[in-house]
Image (tube, grey):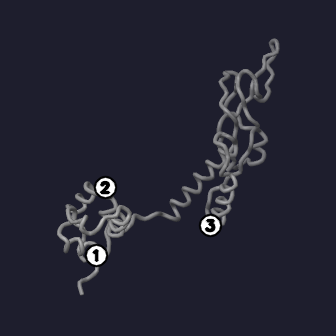
Amino acid sequence: MNVLLWGEQVASSSCLVGKVSPKARREAPHSPTISVGVTCERQDRIGKASVKSPCTQNGIGIHSRRREMNIRPIHNDTIYRETLTEIEGLFDATPGTPEGDRLEVLVTLVEAYERKHFPILPPDPVDAIEYWMESRGLTRRDLEPFIGARGRVAEVLNRRRPLSVEMIRRLHTGLGLPAEILIQPYALQRAA
């Protein structure tokens, strides 16, 4: 896939927007082309004649030089690693520049690949409660108003009793634990 990058938008009404260069068509005739920014030519009026010339810095608008990017979808781990290496090299690119635009497109492709191949599953509810307790300095006694008596808290944290809907509601409203995590199914230990 070819991505054509251009500079800033031009405020001129004399720009002919939407043209793809013949060179780009010759280089990749069967490849879809995405125009990022503006592709155009400026018309200079000389007397009654109209002369087409590429947009340059003038009083009307600014176009930077066109830069063509060859970007391909990430289909395997090798291309994924190559793309990560390229992103690392572009990491300090200034937004709005051709390098910044390339970085943004590559990051979007990597995010899509990672979402598909490396999904982040929600944590186990008991693990989430234990993490919440540890990160906030809570003890099992602090959970009693939300889960029940000391024995009930021990049963839940030792995976002998599942969380009830009422416990989930109280943990969500009282401690701010996300209900989406607490409602996940989890394995219980059998009584010995």
Q: Which of the two discs, 2 and 1, labels the residue nearer the N terminus?
A: 1
Name the residue that disc number 2 marks.
Answer: 176
Residue 187 position by quadrant: bottom left
Residue that label 1 marks:
159
Q: Residue 122 in the image: x percent, y percent?
A: 40, 64
Give neighbour class at mark 3: few <14, some 14-19, many 20+ (Cα, 10 Å): few
Helix or strand or loop: what does disc 2 sit on?
Answer: loop
Question: Is label 2 or label 1 in front?
Answer: 2
Toward the bottom, the furthest residue is: 192
Q: Looking at the picture, which amino acid does disc 3 mark?
A: Asp
In the shown orientation, is residue 136 left or right of residue 161? right
Q: Which residue is mark 3?
A: 77
Which percent across, then down, holds residue 91? 65, 52
Given residues 51 and 184, the one toward you in this image is 184
Q: Nearer the viewer, residue 39 or 154?
A: 154
Q: Which structural element holds mark 1?
A: loop
The amino acid type found where label 2 is placed reads Gly
Considering every residue shown, the one lying at the far left of the view is 149
| Label 2, residues with CA under 10 Å away: few <14, some 14-19, many ≥20 | few
Disc 3 secondary structure class: helix
CA gap between label 3 and label 2 equals 38 Å
Q: Please name the residue shown 71% across and 51% down the image.
A: 70
